[in-house]
Amino acid sequence: MPCCTRIWATPAKGSLCAVRAQTAVHQLTLLRAGDTPRVISELDTLLDAHTMQLASYEENVPPDLRNSLVYRALADVRRYRGEYPLHIDNPTVRAEYQKALDLGMKPATQ
């Protein structure tokens, strides 16, 4: 996922790329040190944060601007969470997370 295309044109992209590079170094260092459970935990947390942000995708993005990649990604998350369930105690948060997962059941041609 190349985020750094023409970073000089968009300062925010440059910052995003720097953060992603820093995260990759951190996780690779942990993996090389044998701390796989910590990396899995961090990646799970990152996945869940991204998933929660997509729960309101259809409320915020008009139909003509929606990207099929979002639906395919949420389908992948749905399959992953089917195999590795997430435990959420808060019913409101659980419902919002489920809302995102349900978007993964829609056709990717949205």
Image: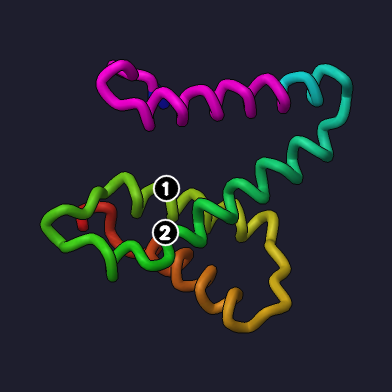
The image shows residue 8 at horizontal and vertical percentages of 31, 16
Which region is colored magenta? 4-27
Secondary structure at badge 2 equals: helix
Q: Nearer the viewer, residue 8 or 61?
A: 8
- Nearer to us of marks 1 and 2 is 2
The residue where tag 2 is placed is 54
Q: Residues within 10 Å of mark 2 (few under 14, many from 20)?
A: many
Relative to residue 109, is residue 97 depicted above or below?
below
- Residue at coordinates 43% horizontally, 69% vertically from top-left? 102
Quadrant in the rendering for residue 86:
bottom right
Q: Badges 1 and 2: C-beta atoms under 8 Å apart? A: yes
The residue where tag 1 is placed is 73
Relative to residue 67, is residue 60 depicted above or below?
below
Amino acid type, mark 2: Leu
The tag earlier along the polypeptide, 1 or 2, is 2
Secondary structure at badge 1 equals: helix
Amino acid type, mark 1: Ala
Q: Is residue 77 left or right of residue 109?
A: right
Q: Main secondary structure of the magenta part?
A: helix
Q: Is residue 38 left or right of residue 24?
A: right
